[in-house]
Structure formats: C-alpha cells, structure tokens
Amino acid sequence: MKKILNIFLILLSLAIIGCEGMLKDASEAGAGFGDIIVKQSNILIDSNLETTSGSGVTVTEGGIDFTTAEVKINGTSKGIGEKFEGLKSGEYKVTVEVKSIDKKDLYYGTEVVKLKVAEVLQPKITLDSWESAVNSWKITFNPTEAGVTVANEVHLVGTLNGWDPTDKTYSLVKQSDGTWSAIYDLDEGTEFKFIYDSTEWNGNDIGNNGANYKLGTNTDGVAEPVLAWKITFNPTEAGVTVANEVHLVGTLNGWDPTDKTYSLVKQSDGTWSAIYDLDEGTEFKFIYDSTEWNGNDIGNNGANYKLGTNTDGVATMDF
C-alpha cells in the first residue's frame, strides 16, 4: 500500500510540473489576456501642436479639457483612467481624442502598442494632430424660462439678417420638450434676439434681459458650439420640382414620413438645406411636398443615404 502511495505521489508531482511547463510555454507563446489603461499623466502634448481657433497659439495642458477625453481601442471608447480588460495578447492601436477648454478644437494622438499576457499596459500617447471640433452653433429658445407662450413659430433676428423681423430664414423647430431649437453656421460675436409669433417689433422679441444676445459672450444656456452636418437637397439634380417643403426621414426619426423635425430651408439658389447634429452612419432619404411614402422620397439611386459613406455633394462637415 505504501508503495502504491509513493507511486501516486510521484505521478502527481510529474503532473504538476507538466502543467507548470505548459503554462510557461503558453505564456512564452503569447497566448492569454491583459489590460490596457491610459491615465491623464500618460498623455503628452507635441510642442508644435497649435489650435485651429487661434493661429500661432501653442496648446498647453491648461488649455485642454481632460474630462472630454476618449480612449478608443478596436471601436470601443472609454474615458481617461478606465481600463480595457481581458484583451488578448497582441498589437493594438490606441487613440486618444480630447477637446480644448472652449470645445472648439479636437486634439488626438495614436500609438500602436504590444500587449503581453497578464500585463496591465499603460502606454504614453502624444497629442500631435488637431482639427476643428465645432463648425456651427445650436440655438435654443425656452418659452417657459422666458415666461411666454408660443403658438406657432420662433425665429432669429439680428446682425445675421439685417435685423429684419419679417425674415424667417433662421427659424427654430419645436422639440418634444417644448423648447425651440436649430443649428446654424454663425460667426462668434453675431448679435440676435428671438421673435415669436410675429414679424414685427411689437413686443414679441426676447433678448438677454432686454439686450441683444451675442454668440460666445452672453449666450450660456441659449447657444452652444457643435460639430454638425450640413444637409443639402438639389431639386434640379434630382429631376423634381418642389412646391412647398423638404424634410428628412430615416433612422433619425424612426422612418416616420409625417415627422418634419428635420426640415430643410429653401435657399436663394433653389436648393434646400439645414444643419443638424447627426451621428456618422445615420441613414436617411429626402421627402418633398408629402408626409406619405407615395414616391416623393429621394435617396441615392433608390437606396438610403448614409452619412459619411455615400453622401458626397449631399452632406458635409466642411462649411
């Protein structure tokens, strides 16, 4: 019996040694998992990096809002200091994107790193490129805060249209929360007021405590800079005649043709356009003079438009 027990212990020892050898071999072969985490202290700034909104202004750590930072790996995004767990050993492209304090510039850097088994990798990423993070302003009017009731419409009047109260080029769209908003390509410093249910100076104009609003100065809660898409419909190119209106229908509104939230505005050149804050990949079609699927919908050769894929000449962020 003692002899059998000794043989069993020997076999058990050999099995344990064998397992350790297998684990060691697997580790050396690169099989297994690890983690990647990018901390704020690991983000560096290229000394030649400059802002887009201020030519010749060198970026400093104090000019960057790290709360907006995103770390991206394999299509997954996390915040600074958040861990990407359970990644297979191998090479990964780690990208960091972060906005400036004024939200007008987007800085980014990329590093290809090699992750080993059971490693918590903390790569250093250098911000070495930038682009404009905004191209327009989202303007919002809140009737409740203004203490008024809006029956039909709200539009902007100001230096953007010669203070002409009859000009509704800069109309706002009613939202589900009762506010009215729209996105427009306006210069910082533009002065304006809201006018509701009127085309005259008859007291239905709302400013900032009676004064004009001035973009970027006294417009907190009323105007915010955003990166948006300008969508344009050209009836001539589409071979149709538009009598009254054009709006978008798609994944942005559940493909509901009766929903005119995403309406376009007729321009002086005969096209219809508007600026909207939409995600890349959003699918849509144009519908004109209709709220039904009755043939008045226009896509890309019959297919849906998809932002960033097949929308050249129809949607752009460069405006």
Image (cartoon, rainbow, N blue to C red):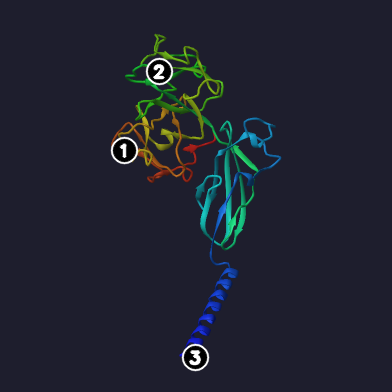
What kind of element bears circle 3? helix
CB under 8 Å between callouts 1 and 2?
no
> Which label is found at residue 3?
3
The residue labelled by disc 2 is: 146
Which residue is located at x 32 percent, y 19 percent? 151
The spot of residue 65 in percent (x, y) is 58, 36
> Which label is found at residue 282?
none
> How many neighbours does mark 2 have within 10 angstroms: few (below 14), some (14-19), or many (20 or more)?
few
Residue extending furthest top? 202
Q: Is residue 26 visible?
A: yes
Residue extending furthest front? 2
Residue extending furthest right? 47
Position of 149 relative to 23 (above/below): above
Which residue is located at x 48 percent, y 89 percent? 2
What kind of element bears circle 1? loop
Position of 136 relative to 309 (above/below): above
The residue labelled by disc 1 is: 256
